[in-house]
Image (tube, rainbow, N blue to C red):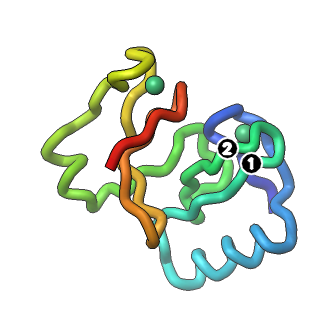
Amino acid sequence: MNVRCPHCQKIFEANQQQEHLLTYAIGKGQRLVMLECPECYWDVPLNPGDLLSNEPQKDEASEKETIAGPVNCPKCADGIMSYINDGNEEFWGCGECGYTRT
Ligand SMILES: [Zn+2]
Ligand SMILES: [Zn+2]
């Protein structure tokens, strides 16, 4: 199972644990899974239905995102804050510098 890391854009093969997680997420119809990329060691939000997407997955159902729209990162000013909901935690994160806030 090949996955593109939306952070470093490298394609890597999901390890057994990740593949298990993805298979489970696909089966459940989840729209977002957090995986650690073995190339850049970032936890990246992925769309289980589109594993080779160049874009980090966002939770489109998020009301917060609809209201706030794309927000520039207050720390590096280059990145855009993305709303992330991995099932346990909800937060905003910058894909450029890794800044997060809840
Ligand atoms: Zn990566
Ligand atoms: Zn940033």
Q: Earlier in the sequence, mark 1 or mark 2?
A: 1
Which residue carries the number 2 mark?
42
Q: Which residue is mark 1?
A: 37
Mark 2 Cβ and ligand 1 under 8 Å apart: yes
Where residue 26 sits, quadrant-wise, is bottom right
Q: Position of residue 93 (x, y in %)?
A: 43, 41
Callout 1 touching callout 2 (CB < 8 Å): yes
- In the image, 51 versus 82, the foreground residue is 82
In the image, what residue occupies the spot 53% across and 34% down? 98
Q: CA distance from mark 1 to mark 2?
A: 5 Å
The amino acid beneath tag 1 is Cys
Q: Which mark is residue 49?
A: none
Q: Name which residue type carries label 2.
A: Trp
Foreground: 55 or 63?
63
The residue located at (80%, 55%) in the rendering is 2
Camera-side residue of 74 and 37: 74
Please identify the quarter of the rendering in which residue 17 is found.
Answer: bottom right
Residue 30 image offset from top left, x and y in percent: 48, 73
Relative to 22, 56 lies left or right: left
Instruction: Decide if ligand 1 comes within 8 Å of the CB at mark 1.
Output: yes
Residue 97 sits above or below residue 12 on the image? above
Q: Is residue 79 left or right of residue 36?
A: left
Q: Quadrant of the N terminus?
A: bottom right
Disc 1, SS? loop
